[in-house]
Image (cartoon, rainbow, N blue to C red):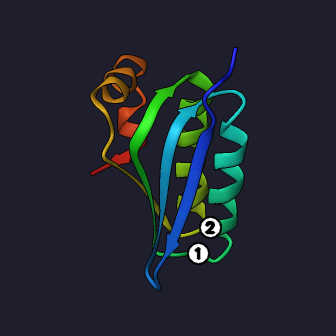
Amino acid sequence: MERPELTVAVQRSPSEAVVSLTGEIDLSTAPRLSTVVTELLSDAPARVVLDMSGVTFCDSQGLGTLVVLSRKASMAQSCLVLTNVADFLLRVLDITGLRPALMIS
């Protein structure tokens, strides 16, 4: 069975980095997301925005990765913000109690 991949596109400006995600965030794709965001944080942009509009699925590994990246951003004096979060993902964040751990705009 062919698994949908995760496409990660980055746009940089002086004050922020926008990471557009398309596909599934799961056990096989979360490490790539983590690597991209961790590399961006090494430059300490004021904000890292994850555009979640193209995300079709996010498992527990994906959720955990988002929370860890949010903490990494805080430690780098940066801010990780999720935008265009789909209703299914908001529900999962509410059910798991992780919504307060993430900044969602």
Residue lying at the far front of the rendered structure: 2
Q: CA distance from mark 2 to mark 1?
A: 5 Å
Residue 17, compared with residue 50, is above or below; it is below
User: Which quarter of the picture shows residue 72?
Assistant: bottom right
Q: Position of residue 63 (x, y in %)?
A: 53, 31
Give neighbour class at mark 1: few <14, some 14-19, many 20+ (Cα, 10 Å): many
**SS type, badge 2:** helix
Residue 1, compared with residue 40, is above or below; it is above
Seen from the viewer's position, the closer of residues 71 and 12 is: 12
Residue 15, compared with residue 102, is above or below; it is below
Q: Report if the CB atoms under discs 2 and 1 are less than 8 Å apart.
A: yes
Q: Position of residue 100 (x, y in %)?
A: 35, 37
- Residue type marked 2: Leu
- Mark number, residue 71: none
Seen from the viewer's position, the closer of residues 53 and 71 is: 53
Q: Residue at x 43, y 30 (%)?
A: 98
Quadrant including the N terminus? top right
In screen coordinates, is 82 left or right of 9? left
Residue 92, compared with residue 41, is above or below; it is above
Give neighbour class at mark 2: few <14, some 14-19, many 20+ (Cα, 10 Å): many
Provide the residue designation for mark 2: 41
- Mark number, residue 44: 1
Q: Residue at x 68, y 72 (%)?
A: 42
Residue lying at the far bottom of the rendered structure: 14
> How many marks do you count on the picture?
2
Q: Residue at x 38, y 27 (%)?
A: 93
**SS type, badge 1:** loop
In screen coordinates, is 65 left or right of 58? right
Q: Residue at x 37, y 28 (%)?
A: 89
Q: Position of residue 99 (x, y in %)?
A: 36, 33
- Residue type marked 1: Ala
